[in-house]
Image (cartoon, rainbow, N blue to C red):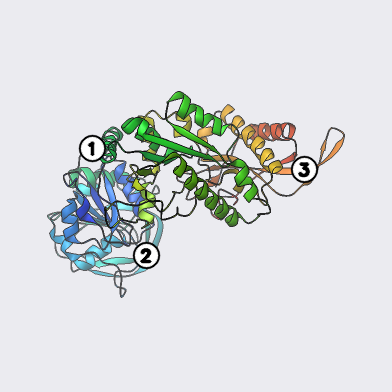
């Protein structure tokens, strides 16, 4: 993954192509028409070690010419191309001389704009379909005949534009893959980017390498080297402040910045009292003692806990914790500063999904108005005029983990399970009290110990406990108990957007239950949550 420096845009905004100083870099541009898979297309291309970027479908041909992509991909979308007001790309794109791949809606738009015809299909096609290859052209040369592809469409191409030919069909779709070989225009009615398309990645590699003639230069090593150079050039001898949470994003950023600017970096770790057992101590040990990265530890636990008194609504908890975090951050940054830059671990999905930028009209610098999602909170006061530095804003989560490994971030952080910003406060249903916090912290520690002891930590996306604000009757020895239950939550997922409850070994469930009930005073029952997402969520609040 070779770094690119142009500013990415939210899907419904026009691309700011003119601010890209790295025009000679290889990239593929993805024009987003509202598909739920546009981000996934970008990830699949990056897996080939070629840089890709998601842009608005409103991006003009001239802006694309300035970006100089090696290829263009038109995403799918929920509209029908023949609907009034349906999104369309700049028709001058077809005159750029750049290879284009249309996916689903993107293919239908290509056909319509170039003189073909699209109509509502007699038989809609959703789910898996066998792709019958008629011509194994460049796009399909490594794709097996009758391989499975994922369909999701109610419209079909009925007449091809001049110069196009059919490459493949399915039982219900005569034009499942098409091409204009001379102009290097290609279209597929299916979604090669999803895992259900068994040889979709092979098709994407054919487009990237053979049709667009890209080289695999988007590597972790190249990104780290360039990011360090860019940070040094931009920051100079000025000071940078980073709000450190202990998660992989902010931790990777801390290690990267420390390699770039050393002691010019100050990390602020605000312990709100809702961390897991021994985590704050371990964080300080790793950063400050082991790697000599300057961390200012702020113990604000009592302050946050006092704000939780009587609060039971989960959204109110998040809001209060977020507001209190802002207050602490504001006062402590003033005490420790002044600082010239605020570093944030913004990732590429945040950039795609949000237009949250605020540019200083005098300097042209982006100004921080939001502390990022590791605390799931709202914006900082606008009078905190830091200049913003976001070296990770071009990366997906899996790419951040690779960068973390490259900058020697310890494996225990690189592969750490996601942990919510409000911490254990939203894993305690109802009011957060010192007693409940202690009980859950001890139970959670045992859960993590047993999961690691069974060598299954990396088999789960998340593994944790939830404390319910109810009590049930139990028997311990000859005594009746009336104590809290702990809900055990073990889930499997690829990205957290969907998740399934894990079919954990009974031996693991038994060891967790026995230890929690026997060792944690105040608990007499452990139950296992077997709800998937959807309809449930991974967290309970």
- Looking at the picture, how far across and down is residue 185, in whole percent? 19, 56
Q: Residue furthest bottom?
A: 84
What residue sits right under mark 1 in the picture? 217
Q: Residue under circle 3?
A: 483
Tell me the crowding category of disc 2: few under 14, some 14 to 19, or many 20 or more residues within 10 angstroms, Cα based. Answer: some
Q: Is residue 482 above or below residue 76?
A: above
Q: Quick check: can you spot residue 149?
A: no
In the picture, measured across the screen, residue 121 lies left or right of residue 289, that is left
Q: Quadrant of the N terminus?
A: top left
Name which of mark 1 and mark 3 comes first in the sequence: 1
- The mark lying in front, picked from 1 and 2, is 1
Q: Residues within 10 Å of mark 1 (few under 14, many from 20)?
A: many
Rendered position, 154 above or below 484:
below
Q: Give the Cα distance between marks 1 and 2.
A: 33 Å
Which mark sits nearer the N-terminus, 2 or 3? Answer: 2
Q: Which residue is mark 2?
A: 78
Q: How many angstroms separate mark 1 from mark 3 (CA)? A: 58 Å
Residue drawn at point x = 49 percent, y = 52 percent = 377
Judge depth for marks 2 and 3 and give the one in front: 3
Relative image position of residue 333 (x, y in whole percent) = 45, 43
Q: Secondary structure at mark 1?
A: loop
Front in this rendered view, residue 459 or 248: 248
* Residue 331 coordinates in the image, percent (x, y): 49, 46
On the image, which quarter does residue 206 sit in? top left
Q: Residue furthest right?
A: 478
Instruction: Specify whether residue 408 is in view.
Output: yes
């Amino acid at each position: 993954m070779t770094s690119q420096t142009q500013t990415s845009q939210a899907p419904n905004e026009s691309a700011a192509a003119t601010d890209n100083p790295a025009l000679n870099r290889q990239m593929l541009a993805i024009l987003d028409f509202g598909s739920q898979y546009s981000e996934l297309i970008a990830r699949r291309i990056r897996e080939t070690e070629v840089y890709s970027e998601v842009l608005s479908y409103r991006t003009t041909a001239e802006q694309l010419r300035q970006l100089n992509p090696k290829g263009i991909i038109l995403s799918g979308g929920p509209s029908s191309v023949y609907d009034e007001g349906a999104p369309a790309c700049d028709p001058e794109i077809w005159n750029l001389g750049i290879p284009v791949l249309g996916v689903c809606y993107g293919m239908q738009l290509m056909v319509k704009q170039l003189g073909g015809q699209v109509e509502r299909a007699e038989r809609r096609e959703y789910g898996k379909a066998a792709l019958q290859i008629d011509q194994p052209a460049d796009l399909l040369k490594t794709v097996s005949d009758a391989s499975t592809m994922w369909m999701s469409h109610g419209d079909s191409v009925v007449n091809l534009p001049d110069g196009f030919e059919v490459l493949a069909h399915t039982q219900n779709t005569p034009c499942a893959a098409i091409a204009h070989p001379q102009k290097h225009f290609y279209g597929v009615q299916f979604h090669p980017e999803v895992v259900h398309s068994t040889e979709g990645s092979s098709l994407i590699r054919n487009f990237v390498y053979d049709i667009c003639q890209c080289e695999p230069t988007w590597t972790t090593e190249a990104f780290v080297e360039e990011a360090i150079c860019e940070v040094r050039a931009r920051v100079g001898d000025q000071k940078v402040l980073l709000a450190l949470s202990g998660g992989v994003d902010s931790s990777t950023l801390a290690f990267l910045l420390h390699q770039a600017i050393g002691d010019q970096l100050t990390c602020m770790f605000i312990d709100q009292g809702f961390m897991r057992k021994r985590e704050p101590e371990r964080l300080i040990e790793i950063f400050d003692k082991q790697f000599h990265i300057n961390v200012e530890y702020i113990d604000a636990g009592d302050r946050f806990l006092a704000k939780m008194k009587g609060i039971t609504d989960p959204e109110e908890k998040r809001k209060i914790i977020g507001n209190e975090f802002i207050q602490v951050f504001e006062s402590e940054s003033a005490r420790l500063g002044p600082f010239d830059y605020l570093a944030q671990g913004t990732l590429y999905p945040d950039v795609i999904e949000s237009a949250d930028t605020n540019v200083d009209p005098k300097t042209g610098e982006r100004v921080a108005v939001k502390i990022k999602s590791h605390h799931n909170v709202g914006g900082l006061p606008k009078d905190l005029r830091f200049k913003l530095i976001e070296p990770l804003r071009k990366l997906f989560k899996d790419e951040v983990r690779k960068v973390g490994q490259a900058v020697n971030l310890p494996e225990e952080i690189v592969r750490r399970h996601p942990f919510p910003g409000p911490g254990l406060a939203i894993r305690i249903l109802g009011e957060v009290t010192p007693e409940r916090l202690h009980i859950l912290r001890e139970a959670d520690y045992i859960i993590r110990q047993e999961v690691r002891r069974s060598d299954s930590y990396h088999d789960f996306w998340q593994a944790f406990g939830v404390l319910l604000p109810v009590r049930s009757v139990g028997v311990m020895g000859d005594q009746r108990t009336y104590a809290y239950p702990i809900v055990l939550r073990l889930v499997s997922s690829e990205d957290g957007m969907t998740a399934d409850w894990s079919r954990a070994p009974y031996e693991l469930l038994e060891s967790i239950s026995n230890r929690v009930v026997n060792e944690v005073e105040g608990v007499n029952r452990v139950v296992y949550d077997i709800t998937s997402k959807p309809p449930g969520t991974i967290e309970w609040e």
